[in-house]
Structures are given as C-alpha cells and as structure tokens.
Image: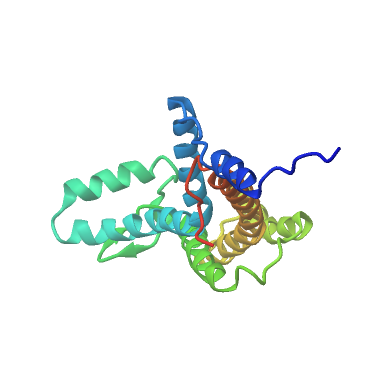
Amino acid sequence: MNQPVTPSFDVRVASDAQSSVVPAPLSREARLILAVDRFIYRVARRWLWVANSAGALMVIPPLLAPFLMATGHQTLAGIIYRLFSLVCHQMPERSFFLFGYQVAYCQRDLAIYSGVLALGLLYGLVRHRVRPLHLRWAAVLALPMAIDGFTQLFGLRESTWELRVVTGALFALATVWVVFPRLEQGFAEIRGVLEERFDRLAREGRAQPLVSR
C-alpha cells in the first residue's frame, strides 16, 4: 500500500512558523551586561586614544602652571602644583623653569611623562609593526635611571639635568615598548571575543552586532 506523500507546502508552512518565533525579551540584568560589554568594546577599540589622552593630562598642566603664574592666575596654578606634588618632590634645583616659574614636576618626571606621550603618539602610526620588548631589554633601558636616581638619593653623587632627562626618556621608551604592544594584543583578543558573542546574539535576534558586516 502506498503511503501518502506530504504536500510540499506543509514543509514551507512549518519552516515559516519556526522562523517566525520571536525570541524572549532580555531581562534587565542581561541588557545591563550587554551595555557593559558594548562599553568595554568601545574602550578596547580606542584604548590608545584613552592612554594618550591620559598622557596629555600628565604633560600639559605641569607646563601650563608657570604660564598661569606669570599671567596672574596663581590660584589655578596653585591647584596644579598641589596635585602634582602627589607624584613628584618638586625640588627647585632639579626642575626646569619657564617664564621665571618652576614647572610643576622635576626634570626626570618631565622626561618620563612627555616621553611616554610622544612615544604613545608615535606608536599609533606603527602599532601593527611593533612587537613587545622582552623584559630583559626593558630592564637594561630602565637601569640607567635606577643607577642615576639611587646614587643621587644616597648622596654618593649629584646628577645633572642632562642625565635626568636622558635616563627618564630611556625609562619612558622601556615602558611604552613593553606595555603598549601587550595592551594592543590583549584588547584585540577582547574585541574578537565580544564581536563573536554579539554576532551570535544577532543571529538569534537578541542584539545588534557590534560591527556592520
């Protein structure tokens, strides 16, 4: 006895019915998690901009403080001096002067922070061609500052502004070369994980993808 053949339109109807299933709405907790993930993704994409902006905040105000003093804005300049006294001894004999007033941190700190900012901006141009510096070589670059700083600290000798600037710049180079490429690798992995997660949720109809394909 021949079995009846199911009409093809039944298959289409079943398929249409299955595809028309609306996903359950996300809970408030799930929506919060997705919002946090989106924020993390934006940071992961723009981490270098964030890092260089922070670097600019460590370079510009200390250089601005002497100008503010010279132009009669002592209150604002005083705030800058007090803030940066938290990270620097601000000894006049180890600091540069602009417009007749002391920069808000010492010569070595100026070399370190301005070096990190300059190298961070440069890294943005070559970020895909720079591999992380091995920690052994980073220690070699940082060693001159350690020797110069500790021998001065213990009164064995007095450093010069040239040595403070050079050793601070070498330390900045070690910092950027060690940290920034590793941050780039780590944030790239974070971006990949989040893009895959949101692509899956988009296929399920539960979220918008992070990146337009």
User: Is residue 155 at all visible to an observer of this figure?
Assistant: no
The percent position of residue 186, horizontal first and vertical second, equals 65, 51
Eyeballing the image, is 89 above or below 54? above
Q: How many marks?
A: 0
Q: Which residue is drawn at 66% across and 56% down?
A: 185
| Coloring scheme used | rainbow
User: Is residue 87 at all visible to an observer of this figure?
Assistant: yes
Quick one: 66 or 59, which is closer to the camera?
59
Q: Quadrant of residue 98?
A: bottom left
The percent position of residue 165, horizontal first and vertical second, equals 53, 65
Q: Residue at x 39, y 62 (%)?
A: 96
Q: Would residue 28 be found to the left or right of residue 134 on screen?
A: left
Quick one: 12 or 190, which is closer to the camera?
12
Q: Would residue 45 be found to the left or right of residue 58 on screen?
A: right
The percent position of residue 44, horizontal first and vertical second, equals 53, 51
The percent position of residue 213, horizontal first and vertical second, equals 54, 62
> In this view, which residue lies farthest toward the front?
1
Quick one: 164 or 132, which is closer to the camera?
132
Q: Would residue 58 be found to the left or right of residue 124 on screen?
A: left
Q: Quadrant of residue 200?
A: top right
Q: Residue at x 51, y 34 (%)?
A: 23
Eyeballing the image, is 122 above or below 89? below
Quick one: 140 or 32, which is closer to the camera?
32
> In this view, which residue lies farthest toward the left?
72
Q: Which residue is drawn at 32% across and 55% down?
A: 61
Quarter of the image with the N terminus is top right
Eyeballing the image, is 22 above or below 124? above
